[in-house]
């Protein structure tokens, strides 16, 4: 009973807008997951977490197993470890199926605070920045030379 009191019970993110808000802030990559975090400015002291596993990761059975393992890892976190007043999104990867559970929990603990750093944010789709639409504005190869 005493051990259950020390475990954190984080509420889950449900709305797409909440997931998108977290995606604009910090990010930390680990072997089995990527962790995005956003420190909320409101007075709510509780932390919330959302889970995402894309279809690229595998079939429905594998995706659900990954999600269950990640939920169990979050349930193992102590209330003293989780920063309060923050939202997190955990993006599961296939490695979460084979990584030892203790390593999964340890990676999660080590990534909580760095994920809240907005300097760790990356472009949403991973693309490189461009000067404008279409091709680059620079001169192309001269076809008349030759």
Image (spheres, rainbow, N blue to C red):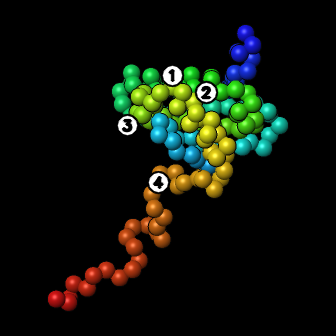
- Residue 22 shows in this picture: no
Sooner in the amino-acid sequence: mark 4 or mark 1: 1
Sooner in the amino-acid sequence: mark 2 or mark 4: 2
State the separation of the CA atoms marked 2 and 4: 27 Å
| Tag 4 residue | 126
State the separation of the CA atoms marked 3 and 1: 17 Å
Q: Tell which tag, 3 or 1, sits nearer the viewer.
A: 1
Task: Say above or below: 58 vs 61.
Answer: below
| Tag 3 residue | 56
Task: Say above or below: 90 vs 134.
Answer: above
| Tag 2 residue | 74
Q: Tell which tag, 3 or 2, sits nearer the viewer.
A: 2
| Tag 1 residue | 68
Rendered residue at 61%/27% (across/down): 74
Residue farthest to the left, as pictured: 146
Q: Residues within 10 Å of mark 4 (few under 14, many from 20)?
A: few
């Amino acid at each position: 009973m005493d051990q259950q009191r020390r475990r954190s019970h984080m509420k889950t993110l449900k709305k797409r807008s909440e997931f998108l808000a977290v995606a604009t802030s910090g990010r930390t990559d680990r072997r089995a997951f990527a962790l995005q975090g956003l420190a909320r400015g409101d007075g709510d002291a509780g932390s919330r977490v959302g889970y995402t596993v894309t279809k690229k990761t595998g079939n429905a059975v594998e995706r659900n197993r990954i999600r269950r393992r990640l939920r169990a890892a979050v349930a193992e976190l102590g209330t003293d470890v989780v920063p309060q007043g923050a939202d997190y999104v955990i993006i599961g990867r296939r490695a979460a199926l084979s990584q030892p559970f203790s390593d999964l929990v340890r990676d999660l603990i080590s990534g909580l605070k760095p994920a809240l750093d907005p300097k760790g944010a990356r472009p949403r789709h991973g693309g490189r920045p461009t000067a404008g639409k279409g091709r680059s504005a620079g001169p192309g190869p001269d076809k008349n030379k030759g």
